[in-house]
């Protein structure tokens, strides 16, 4: 782990777990630190939950920092969220970062049966609750989106646990800079980073900017692009991501895609995603091309990339992990 002169953490991470059963991933995770990676980051959607891979990594690779990108703010109650974070912080003192965010209506409502209401306020309220609870306070508070009556952690983390907020548009980015330790961003181009990082840093100079970056280290562009567009469409048509890309000025370029998707022509809609947008949101090419593309994100304000390897076309996983490591 490295801190800049202003105290900002800078790291270089890999998203875990890798494809396949968790119990077979020890060697791959152990090797990351030796290759120069500083972090592993997990997600929580349709695979493993966000904490189990990190619990394993905390033992298998005790030099790595561990982060969630992200735990949805709706799918655990406030007390359970505090317990989950405190548990990981106890397993890996000083090495755990809690990334939380609103997630989306698909994950929260469609898959978990929980109303996706006031996502900004819910995330903000949870950050405020966690600050109090992780500091050992007994919390009795009525927030805008939930109330807590008399909760206190019995095992307060030995060291402060950074809390980062997943953010897309201006309101959440400002809140991340103002009320948390930084922002987590994804599905954005290297050029987009300068805009979003500036908003975070207006509120909190020096705050961390973690980016989940999606890569397929294959030079076969003709094979990668159609599958990349299919993967992108699952996000581009979620309302919060659509609003983000409209805000980024891609409304006209993606308009026909959104229209055909809404009309039920899913296959035809993929052809309406411009190649240049796929090129900018999914990193692909040779390993050196991909590495250079990642550096553009860092140059524009990302402090910690978390590389997410997508099997959109054939490539050697071990070779890619080694070749994409910091140089």
Image (cartoon, rainbow, N blue to C red):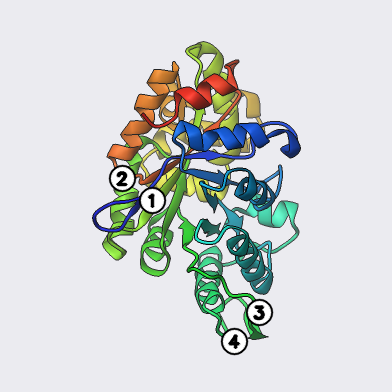
Q: Quadrant of residue 279?
A: top left
* Residue at x-position 28% and y-position 38%: 299
Residue located beneath label 3 in the image? 154
Marks 3 and 1, the one that precedes in the sequence: 3
Pinpoint residue 231: horizontal percent, then vertical percent: 59, 31
Q: Nearer the viewer, mark 3 or mark 1?
A: 3
Q: Pointers 2 and 1 in contact (CB under 8 A)?
A: yes
Residue contact at pointers 4 and 1, CB within 8 angstroms: no
Cα distance between the residues tagged 2 and 1: 7 Å
Sequence-wise first label, 4 or 3? 4
Disc number at residue 225? none
| Front-lying residue, 106 or 61 | 61
Label 2 to label 3, Cα distance in Å?
A: 38 Å
Q: Nearer the viewer, mark 4 or mark 1?
A: 4
From the viewer's perspective, is residue 262 above or below residue 128? Answer: above
Residue 274 appears in the picture as rendered: no
The image's mark for residue 301 is 2
The residue identified by callout 4 is: 138
Q: Depth check: 246 or 130 in front?
A: 130
């Amino acid at each position: 782990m490295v801190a800049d002169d202003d105290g900002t953490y800078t790291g270089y991470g890999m998203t875990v777990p890798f494809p396949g059963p968790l119990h077979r991933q020890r060697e791959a995770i152990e090797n990351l630190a030796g290759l120069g990676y500083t972090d592993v980051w997990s997600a929580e959607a349709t695979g493993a939950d966000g904490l189990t891979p990190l619990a394993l990594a905390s033992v298998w690779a005790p030099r790595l920092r561990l982060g969630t990108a992200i735990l949805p703010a709706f799918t655990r109650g406030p007390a359970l969220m505090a317990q989950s974070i405190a548990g990981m912080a106890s397993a890996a003192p000083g090495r755990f970062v809690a990334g939380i965010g609103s997630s989306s209506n698909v994950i929260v409502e469609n898959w978990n049966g929980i109303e996706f209401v006031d996502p900004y306020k819910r995330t903000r309220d949870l950050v405020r609750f966690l600050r109090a609870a992780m500091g050992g306070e007994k919390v009795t508070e009525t927030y805008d989106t939930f109330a807590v009556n008399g909760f206190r952690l019995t095992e307060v983390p030995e060291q402060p646990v950074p809390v980062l907020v997943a953010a897309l548009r201006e309101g959440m980015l400002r809140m991340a800079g103002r009320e948390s330790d930084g922002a987590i961003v994804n599905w954005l181009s290297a050029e987009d980073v300068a805009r979003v990082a500036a908003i975070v840093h207006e509120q909190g100079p020096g705050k961390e900017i973690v980016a989940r970056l999606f890569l397929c280290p294959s030079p076969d562009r003709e094979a990668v692009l159609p599958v990349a567009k299919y993967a992108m469409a699952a996000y581009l048509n979620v309302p919060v991501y659509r609003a983000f890309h409209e805000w980024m000025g891609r409304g006209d370029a993606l308009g026909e895609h959104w229209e055909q998707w809404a009309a039920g022509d899913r296959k035809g809609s993929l052809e309406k995603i411009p190649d240049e947008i796929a090129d900018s949101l999914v990193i692909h090419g040779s390993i050196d091309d991909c590495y250079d593309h990642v550096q553009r994100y860092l140059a524009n304000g990302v402090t910690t990339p978390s590389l997410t390897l997508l099997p959109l076309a054939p490539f050697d996983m071990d070779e890619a992990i080694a070749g994409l490591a910091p140089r």
